[in-house]
Image: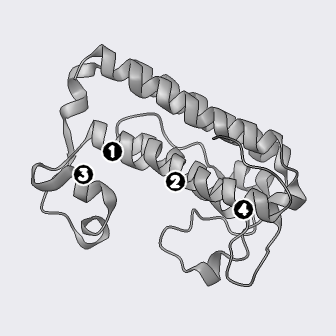
Amino acid sequence: MDAAYRSSLLRRLAAAHSLYYDACDTMDVEQVNTVVAPTSLPIAFSLVHQVLIEDGTVVFVGGPPPQFTPEWATRLALGVEDHGKERSVAEMMDQRIGNYDAFKEFQRSVFVATEAYVESIEPSSFDEVIVAAPYGPAVASTFSARVGGEHGITRSDALECWIYQHALRHMGEIEHARSLVGLGGMTS
């Protein structure tokens, strides 16, 4: 991989992040926390899940330590202080964002740190395997394991799957859920 790949990944991450900024700036906390049906997670779940996963992933791929601290947890006043990856839908139905302004501040801080880290990566290290095959049970059934295949999950695979593609997946959920709370979609 080369600097052109790094530049492309950085532009794509910044574009995905800009969708989250736009979404958050055009929703209020009531819309974000609305539960429209007993088994439909609120938008708050997708927002919190994505940013906490990104925050934890960056350190795993060689970036700065996670920013989610007890101080942030107190400021955000989340309904569930967890990204929810290993929890059931029923457990995450209580996800709410108590302090929406603080959440947007936290989200921006995580996104800025991610982009700064990607910009600092030595291009030759993108091909470094960070999760070797064969994969353990927690990884074997994931999309990233399919991408990594028999050679293992590289730093670029992890950034693409765990941050970029993951962010777009949850943005799709957010765009759909926006219509359920009376808002329009964001992109065509």
The number of numbered badges drawn on the structure is: 4
Please, what secondary structure does the residue beneath circle 2 have? helix
Question: Which residue: 24% across, 67% down?
Answer: 140
Residue under label 4: 177
Contact flag, marks 1 and 3 (Cβ < 8 Å): no
Contact flag, marks 4 and 1 (Cβ < 8 Å): no
Q: Residue 119: which quarter of the image?
A: top left
Q: In the rendering, which numbered label is found on residue 158? A: 1
From where the camera sits, is residue 77 visible? Answer: yes
Contact flag, marks 4 and 3 (Cβ < 8 Å): no
Residue under label 3: 147
Question: Which residue: 72% across, 48% down?
Answer: 185
**What crowding class fits label 3: few (fewer than 14 Cα within 10 Å), some (14-19), or many (20 or more)?**
some
| Earlier-in-chain disc, 1 versus 2 | 1
Q: Nearer the viewer, residue 188 or 151?
A: 188
| Earlier-in-chain disc, 4 versus 2 | 2
Identify residue type, mark 4: Ala
Residue under label 2: 169
Please, what secondary structure does the residue beneath circle 3 have? helix
Please, what secondary structure does the residue beneath circle 4 have? helix
Please, what secondary structure does the residue beneath circle 1 have? helix
Q: Is residue 92 left or right of residue 140?
A: right
Identify residue type, mark 2: Arg
